[in-house]
Image: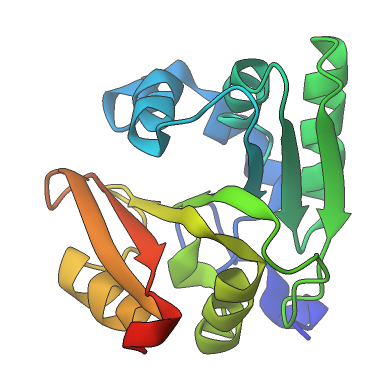
Amino acid sequence: MITKEKQYKNSFSGKGVFPPKYAFTLLIPFRNIFLSPRKLIQRLDLKEDHKVLEIGPGPGYFSTHVAKKLKRGRLVLLDIQCEMLDFSKKRLDKRKITNVEYKLTDGVSIDLESDDFDRIFMVTVIGEVDNQSNYLNEINRILKEDGVLSISELAGDPDKLSIEELQSLVTAHGFEASDIFGSKLNYTVNFRKKNKIDM
């Protein structure tokens, strides 16, 4: 489990888990230059009935748009910081968005059903995860056989992985890269679970 001492960055720009007191900076529309909610939704190839997990939603910058797209589906927000989940919930409640669940995690395991999600996505999160190997195994477990794990990394994030580093990390846990969008500065890589016969 991540201790309180390690949990937050020392500052707005340092390495580590993003501190809730700076959450408002994650809602600045300037972020659209790097990755807009509309572009992310296109890359996720979302269907209205999908069940989607967002890991590390922060204050819900992408969450509101994804939830609105899921007219007959459901969005689950998973975070290690209850303050961020509270921030997201307040923001989505204000917009009367109700097809969302909020789950607090311990940073070690993911307490969700196996083979349950059509899409799992994270934006500038994977580099902050202490237990990357364990998390990726858990993600593989809860993702449906035809599901997609989508990971986006953006310029300016001190924890950013390169495309090569990300592919090496994720493919070692039962995934294969299916699509790459953007550039080396700002990118999204979609991964699919390997067929169990091929593993």
Between residue 179 and residue 87, name the one nearer to us: 179
Tell me where residue 74 appears, x and y as whole percent: 75, 33
Q: Residue at x 38, y 62 (%)?
A: 192
Tell which residue pokes out farthest to the top in this image. Answer: 95
Residue drawn where x is 21% and y is 67% of the image:
162
Report the front residue among 81 and 67: 67
From the viewer's perspective, tell me whether residue 146 is left or right of residue 96: left
The colour style of the image is: rainbow
If the image is split into quadrants, where does the N terminus sit? bottom right
* Residue extending farthest front: 197
Q: Is residue 113 left or right of residue 67?
A: right
Measuring from the top left, give residue 194's x and y in whole percent.
37, 74
Examine the rendered structure and indicate whether residue 131 appears above or below residue 100. Answer: below
Residue 188 percent coordinates (x, y): 29, 48
Q: Residue at x 80, y 35 (%)?
A: 87
Quadrant of the image containing the C terminus: bottom left
Relative to 156, does residue 70 appear above or below in the rendering? above
Q: From the top left corner, tell me how far across and down residue 54 is, in percent.
A: 62, 47
State whether residue 15 appears in this view.
no
